[in-house]
């Protein structure tokens, strides 16, 4: 499937060949070509990133005292190793680059959605608590800061703005694979008769809407979440995405002005794919250390004799009182007076819930139920406000004015 045609030239006027191979290129370091040098460096970085991130996810799985929050944290962390693996495979197998590139956006979308729901858990641990919390709030409108928006309406708008991101990117990633197989994608062209420009525009618009919604949510809710350091948690995984976007723009500029071009040591594939993916693999290493700090397990670790984490307890309610059906597979272990984690032996139940597509689907359905309840309550509040306003106008119009009599 990754090599549908053996033609040297691209189909339908695409400047890229149908089958991309990294051949040629002289020695870059010693007797190594840039391609082999790239595989060694990016492979070492990939091993480091996987050791750090999977180790962190394993500690959350074995110290899962709050499944609602920690499963979301595992999905957030997942973006970095997934991005790293896809980048490394694209370096080693250049022909797979076009087929895998779109799925990096999917992992970003899942991580961003999990981050939004994690922030909501910080504000209140239960669905009922979230509805009550947001019903008591008024937030500023982004483009009309002098006007206020009901907190429930704000929550609903934010949720829809973020949940569309993984859906759009998944559709775009599948469309990218199919159009490439049909020779209608063409990574190296922005001509309108190729799908590349349209899928890029769709994912860029979707990304902008989702990221803007998250930032607006943070700006309006940061006073209620100071203890959780939400900006550090956001930067820990979104900084990677921002750097990748900036680097893509930089490479486009450098290629446009002729600074980057094939030479005796660098092939066209090295310039187009190898060098950008190498930079991604290298920069994920320090970002993994940032993840270790932002999503450390210490707030969820239990002392002997405790059955609740020491820190980061959400406002009001118990962390065991939740409405998320996706965590039903997580069972408690231990007895009273001993540590009680919910990940099962060696965290296997936590890993199973994290890896299960059904668990992720149920988490989205749970979020939709929350939004539906919020919208229903918002309609009731709006109707009550309308009736109160009409009653006030009626009293003003028909009630006779009161007079006072002199003594």
Image (spheres, rainbow, N blue to C red):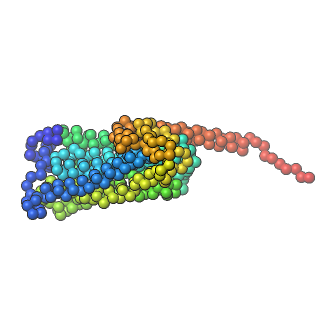
Whether residue 164 is visible to the viewer of this picture, yes or no, is no
Q: Nearer the viewer, residue 392 or 40?
A: 40
**For the point 32% across and 56% down, which residue is it?**
288
List x then y, in percent, for residue 249: 27, 58
Looking at the image, which residue sits at the far right? 407
Looking at the image, how many numbered discs can be counted on the residues? Answer: 0
Q: Is residue 315 visible?
A: yes
Q: Is residue 1 above or below residue 85?
A: above
Rendered residue at 25%/49% (across/down)? 85
385 sits left or right of 114 in the view: right
Q: Is residue 246 left or right of residue 231?
A: left
Q: Position of residue 5 (x, y in %)?
A: 11, 40
Residue 239 falls in image quadrant: bottom left
Kindly identify the residue that appears in the image at 27 percent across and 46 percent down. Answer: 102
Using the image as rendered, state which of residue 174 and residue 280 is in the foreground: 280
Q: Quadrant of the N terminus?
A: top left
Residue drawn at point x = 43 percent, y = 54 percent: 298
Q: Position of residue 29 (x, y in %)?
A: 12, 63
In the rendered structure, the answer to whether residue 12 lies left or right of residue 222 reads left
């Amino acid at each position: 499937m990754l090599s549908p045609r053996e033609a040297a030239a691209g189909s339908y006027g695409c400047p890229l060949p149908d089958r991309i191979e990294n051949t040629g290129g002289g020695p870059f370091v010693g007797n190594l070509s840039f391609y082999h040098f790239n595989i060694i460096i990016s492979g070492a970085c990939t091993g480091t990133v996987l050791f750090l991130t999977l180790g962190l996810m394993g500690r959350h799985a074995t110290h899962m005292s709050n499944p609602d929050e920690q499963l979301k944290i595992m999905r957030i962390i997942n973006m970095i190793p997934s991005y790293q693996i896809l980048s490394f495979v694209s370096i080693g197998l250049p022909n797979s680059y076009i087929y895998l590139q779109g799925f990096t956006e999917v992992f970003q979308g899942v991580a961003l959605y999990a981050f939004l729901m994690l922030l909501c858990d910080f504000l209140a641990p239960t669905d009922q608590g979230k509805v009550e919390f947001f019903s008591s709030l008024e937030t500023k409108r982004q483009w009309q800061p002098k006007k206020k928006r009901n907190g429930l309406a704000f929550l609903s708008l934010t949720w829809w703005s973020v949940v569309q991101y993984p859906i759009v990117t998944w559709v775009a990633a599948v469309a990218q694979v199919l159009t490439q197989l049909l020779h209608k994608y063409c990574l190296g062209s922005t001509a309108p008769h190729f799908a590349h420009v349209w899928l890029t525009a769709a994912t860029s618009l979707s990304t902008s809407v989702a990221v803007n919604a998250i930032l607006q949510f943070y700006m309006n809710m940061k006073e209620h979440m100071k203890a959780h350091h939400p900006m550090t948690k956001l930067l820990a995984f979104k900084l990677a995405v921002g750097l990748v976007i900036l680097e893509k723009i930089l490479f486009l500029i450098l290629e446009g002005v002729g600074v980057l071009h094939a030479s005796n040591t660098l092939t066209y594939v090295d310039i187009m794919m190898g060098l950008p993916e190498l930079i991604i693999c290298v920069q994920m290493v320090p970002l993994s250390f940032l993840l270790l700090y932002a999503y450390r397990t210490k707030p969820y670790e239990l002392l002997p004799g405790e059955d609740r984490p020491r820190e980061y307890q959400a406002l009001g309610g118990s962390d065991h009182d939740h409405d998320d059906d996706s965590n039903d597979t997580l069972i408690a272990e231990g007895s009273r007076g001993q540590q009680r984690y919910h990940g099962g032996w060696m965290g296997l139940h936590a890993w199973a819930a994290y890896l299960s597509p059904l668990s992720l689907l149920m988490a989205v359905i749970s979020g939709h139920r929350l939004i539906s309840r919020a919208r229903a309550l918002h309609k009731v509040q709006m109707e009550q406000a309308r009736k109160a306003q009409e009653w006030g106008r009626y009293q003003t119009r028909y009630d006779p004015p009161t007079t006072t009599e002199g003594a």
